[in-house]
Image (cartoon, rainbow, N blue to C red):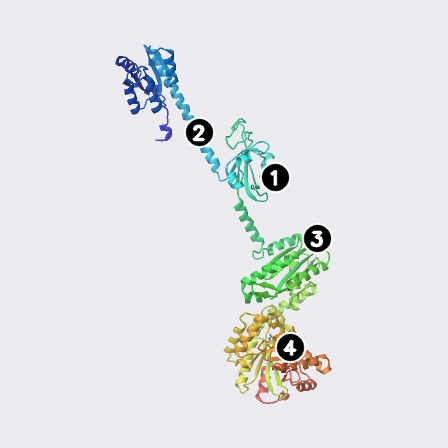
Amino acid sequence: MTPEHTEQPRSQAVSARILVVDDEPRLLNTLASLLRQQGYDVTAATGGRRACELIDQHPFDLALLDLRMADVDGFDVMAHLAKCQPDCGAVVVSGESAFTAVSRALRRGALDYIRKPFDPEELLATVESVLSQQSLVRAHEHIQMRLEKSEALHRYIVNSSPDIVFMLDEDGHFCFVNHKVESLLGYTPAELCGKHFRHVLDDRDVARGMYALQGPGISADNPRTLEVRLKTRGSRRATRHFEITAFPVDPQTWPPSSNLAGEASGKTARYYGIARDVTDRKEAEAFINFQAYHDLLTRLPNRALFKDRLELAITQARRNQQKLAVMFLDLDRFKIVNDTLGHAMGDRLLQAVTHRLTQFLRKGDTLSRFGGDEFTLLLPSIHSHDDAKHIAKKLIRALRAPFQLGEHEVFVGVSIGIAVFPEAGSTMDQLIQSADIAMYHVKARGKDGYRFYSESMSVDTASRLSLERDLRLALERDELKVYYQPQVCSQSNRIVGLEALVRWQHPERGLLYPGDFLPLAEETRLISQVSERVLDRACKDVGRWIRSGHPDLRLAVNLSPVQVEHPRFVETLMQRVQAHQFPPENLEIEITENVIMSDLEQISQKLRELAAFGVRIAIDDFGTGYSSLNYLHRLPIHTLKVDQSFVKAIRSGEDGACIVNAIVAMAHGLKLEIVAEGVETDEQLDYLRSLGCHQVQGFFYGPARPPEDINRLLGSWPARVASF
Ligand SMILES: Nc1nc2c(ncn2[C@@H]2O[C@H](COP(=O)(O)O[C@H]3[C@@H](O)[C@H](n4cnc5c(=O)[nH]c(N)nc54)O[C@@H]3COP(=O)(O)O)[C@@H](O)[C@H]2O)c(=O)[nH]1
């Protein structure tokens, strides 16, 4: 049974339960039978005590009481009744006619007073009237109770809503706000009621908010929905995002006199609505949007956003007949850091580089991470090439300073290609490509600098592309050859070593020299494959000659910086040497001072490992590079190769001759072997002999030759090379 059923009032008088109380049995019976005849459910009690007992046991709708009774009088019965059954009405039927008695009975709660002897009709009319009044009171109480419950239910629903529920008056002042506003914005409803909604609306959204409310066409079928930022209490800058739906209040269903208790201001509500907190969604959207257009590591715009901004900048530059510059930046030596210190350090380096670069940018410039270690920079309005040059120089200088990555001090540089609109291209793709080509030319000329794009660079690029394709084919078709140039003992004229020098037998262009294709091989990273071929071939050829009776014959091989910088350089080299069963002590690797100085710590370690393995180390082109004599005695170096330029100077008696003197003297002091390169004349040879230079190499004894020629030469060993 539902509570409504249990709380239903006893509406019909015919079923009313009536307690009749008198201590005079005759009168009691008369009264009881009169009422029973009318269909009432009558219980008779002889005397007040019995009446109280019955009141304790049964529910009644009405009690008819005598006042004066011997045991317990009518007043006490009324008192007991009021205590035990407050809803039961009482009517006094008494012979007492004194005003005080009547007045006292009515004050104690009697609903009516009938004098004995009573008129049956009057009594029945009174009973019926009292019962019907009681029924009305009960019905009213029931309705009141249901209203209160309903009101509590709706209040609960409104205040438990996950959204802010509000009502506004005609001018936009809050008439009502639910409690949710407190947890979402920090205001109590009472604080907001009477305030204009501008009070919580972010300044940037006020105009839209006003229009939404006061603009035309708002109706119940056409509510206003808009997204706005609402200010939280305390901090004016903290806002949250809300989706607001506002409806007009229908005056028919919401009369102006209506009022809401508690949070209501009492003003006439014209609008109501809900404000849903969509901050999480907005933040997720913003993050997704950020991710789509930014590089998460550096937080810079990505390629897509850069292109977008460049497109816009080109349109503006064209309209205003202005110049703009696109720079393509590629970090030098980034790969080395990444390969040797690991990707985490590589990432830190990119972040540090970004930090430095952004310090030189103006508002409106766009620096983007284009991918890997490549950045692009858009300078949307420049007056001349000088502006771009000025910035490029600053960036280069900034990145030249060392980076501290944990305990490692790292040096990187940057190569910058610059394309200026409109000369270097009129479209976004053309400008980026031109800047890329210009950057590539910086790399080809030794990195760490800048160049402006010029048309001639594109021609170079076309031929470079075809050469790159040909070089890949050359590796497949085994077109790379190894030639050998003897290294000769200056005293005995005997061949003590052979320098392996690569050649390319190009099917159309004939025999190509290293200078024609090695720079390209380095840039395209094909150098590793080229070097592998040369080493394999040389180990086979020279190994064969060693085994055929020339056990001391030395093989000198040139190594490229890319090879040496590779983290697995030592391991790979050793594996190859072992695979060919080539004696490591017969191998001499030639590296330049620049390679050593690019990362002294790392390279020293690698050289020590190789030296421990038995491999000899020679410094090639000694005296021409980044000289720091300090490393000579700290590294396991066996040979210094005097650069050709110094040897050539001997003939003309230039300063170079003095340098040769110094290098030879120093090599003697450090107990290093010395090989003079590029010896072409008797004069040079004699001079070097007189200095005590151990070995010489050059056209005087002949250029590098294919293995067949060397084979022939060695066949007559220990022949003098002069016959070569
Ligand atoms: N990583 C690799 N580098 C290599 C390899 N093979 C060669 N190289 C490098 O290319 C540079 C040029 O080599 P190349 O054109 O072969 O020139 C060498 C000699 O032909 C030349 N030479 C020798 N004697 C004379 C001479 O009397 N006069 C004269 N004008 N030139 C002469 O010198 C070059 C050898 O120089 P060096 O290496 O310094 O001993 C070359 O420098 C290599 O670095 C390779 O396989 N891998």
Q: Residue 622 carries which label?
A: 4
Which is in the foreground here, disc 3 or disc 1? 1
Is residue 475 visible in the rendered image? The answer is no
Foreground residue among 466 and 143: 143
Look at label 4 and name its amino acid: Phe
Query: Quick one: label 4 or label 1, which is nearer the N terminus?
Result: 1
On screen, residue 100 versus residue 724, left or right, reads left
Which is in the foreground here, disc 2 or disc 1? 2
In the rendering, at what x and y percent does residue 696 appear?
A: 64, 83
The CA distance from mark 3 to mark 1 is 37 Å
Q: Do the residues labelled 4 and 1 touch (CB within 8 Å)?
A: no
Query: Quick one: label 4 or label 2, which is nearer the N terminus?
Result: 2
Look at label 3 and name its amino acid: Arg
Foreground residue among 122 and 97: 97
Image quarter of residue 133: top left
Kindly state the secondary structure of the residue where label 4 is placed: strand
Kindly state the secondary structure of the residue where label 1 is placed: helix
Q: Do the residues labelled 4 and 3 touch (CB within 8 Å)?
A: no
Look at label 1 and name its amino acid: Val
Kindly state the secondary structure of the residue where label 2 is placed: helix
Residue beneath label 2, please? Answer: 148
On screen, residue 28 versus residue 723, left or right, reads left
In the rendering, at what x and y percent does residue 92 appear?
A: 34, 15
Q: Which mark is residue 206?
A: 1
Q: As displayed, is residue 44 above or below residue 149?
A: above
Residue beneath label 3, please? Answer: 318
Query: Quick one: label 3 or label 2, which is nearer the N terminus?
Result: 2
Look at label 2 and name its amino acid: Glu
The CA distance from mark 2 to mark 1 is 39 Å
Q: Do the residues labelled 2 and 1 touch (CB within 8 Å)?
A: no
Q: Residues within 10 Å of mark 4 (few under 14, many from 20)?
A: many
